[in-house]
Amino acid sequence: DMNLQTMARFTVGSAKYSVLDREMIDSLTGDISSTPYVVFNGKIRNKQSLLADAHSKMHFQIAEAVHLKDFIASFWMGDYTEAAKSSDIALSFPSSKMPKVQLVYHIFYRG
């Protein structure tokens, strides 16, 4: 949490990606006590407000990342219907056409 706070102070964009990673890991491990969004001091309170912020600022990479993290979490939790929905949404963004490591994982799991 201390590292997230430092990151948010200097690079808010990177902190957004890191918070998504932290939230996904916490979800998969069952840690419901974690509150990674607190690093944004109330400006972004949860994943939905992060998504709304990304859409309002046209930061499609962040919006895509939200749905890719949802895809991975849903896949590992065995909810393949939800994983497919998240995958389709992630692939609808223009940024999904750019090659990146996350899409390699996505394609591997999606098949």
Image (cartoon, helix red, strand yellow):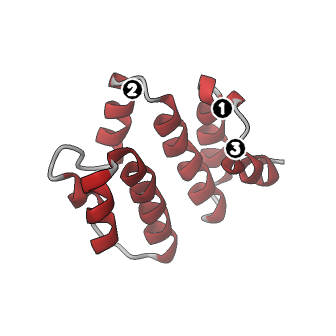
Q: Earlier in the sequence, mark 1 or mark 2?
A: 2
Q: Mark 1 points at which residue?
A: 96
Q: Are marks 1 and 3 in contact (CB under 8 Å)?
A: no
**Viewer-nearest residue: 42 or 27:** 42
Task: Name the amino acid type tagged 2.
Answer: His
Q: Earlier in the sequence, mark 2 or mark 3?
A: 2
Callout 1 secondary element: helix
In the figure, residue 53 lies in which quadrant? Answer: top left
Q: Mark 2 points at which residue?
A: 55
**Viewer-nearest residue: 56 or 15:** 15
Answer above or below: position of 1 versus 105. below
Q: Depth-wise, is mark 2 or mark 3 nearer the camera? A: 3
Answer above or below: position of 55 versus 23. above
Callout 3 secondary element: loop
Q: On the rendered structure, is 61 left or right of 10?
A: right
At label 3, counting other C-alpha atoms closer than 10 Å, the crowd grade (few under 14, some 14-19, many 20 or more) is few
Answer above or below: position of 35 versus 111. below
Q: Residue at x 33, y 32 (%)?
A: 52
Give the x, y percent position of residue 54.
38, 32
Q: Name the residue under label 3.
A: 100
Asked if one can make out residue 105 in the rendered structure from this viewpoint, the answer is yes
Q: Distance between the residues labelled 1 and 3?
A: 9 Å
Q: Distance between the residues labelled 1 and 2?
A: 15 Å
At label 2, counting other C-alpha atoms closer than 10 Å, the crowd grade (few under 14, some 14-19, many 20 or more) is some
